[in-house]
Amino acid sequence: MNEKLLTKFILSYLIDKEDYMELAPKQQQLVFETCKTIMTAIYNAIKFDNVYPVIMCGDPEAQIVISRALESVQGILPSIEKITIHTIH
């Protein structure tokens, strides 16, 4: 995966979101890194048949949000069902 292309893609999406632009820089970085983790997991699930990505979350709310986001595209990208999301303490 081309990291520069992925970064450009994510930032071009986030820059258009008013909510993102209103966040503090640390929060913007967290949102960006979360998007990057999700996109990398999706890429790996699609590209490699034997890879089952696991996304680790710090709290239950993040797990719910990420799960809903992935479920919303599961009809388009069936490989997403291979991704597991866990909350760590």
Image (tube, rainbow, N blue to C red):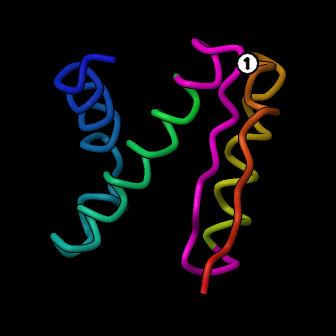
> Which image quarter: residue 48?
top right
> Which image quarter: residue 34?
bottom left
Chain part drawn in magenta: 44-61
Kindly identify the residue that appears in the image at 74 percent across and 53 percent down. 67
How many C-alpha atoms fall within 10 Å of the one at disc 1: few (<14), some, or many (≥20)? some
Where in the figure is residue 19, as x and y percent of width and height? 37, 61
Q: To which residue does mark 1 refer?
A: 77
Q: Is residue 31 magenta?
A: no
Q: Is residue 37 left or right of residue 20?
A: right
Q: Is residue 58 above or below residue 81?
A: below
Q: Is residue 58 left or right of residue 6?
A: right
Q: Is residue 48 magenta?
A: yes
Where in the figure is residue 46, as x and y percent of width and height? 63, 16
User: Which residue is at the front of the view, 9 or 49?
Assistant: 49
Kindly identify the residue that appears in the image at 70 percent across and 20 percent down. 50
Kindly identify the residue that appears in the image at 24 percent across and 59 percent down. 21
Where in the figure is residue 81, as x and y percent of width and height? 82, 33
User: Which residue is at the front of the view, 88 or 9?
Assistant: 88
Kindly identify the residue that appears in the image at 76 percent across and 37 percent down. 72
Q: Is residue 72 above or below residue 65?
A: above
**Three-letter amino acid code of the residue under disc 1:** Leu
Q: Is residue 5 above or below residue 7?
A: above
Residue at the far bottom: name it: 89
Location of the N terminus (image quadrant): top left
Location of the C terminus (image quadrant): bottom right
**Local SS, label 1:** loop
How many marks can you see? 1
Where in the figure is residue 80, as x and y percent of width and height? 74, 30
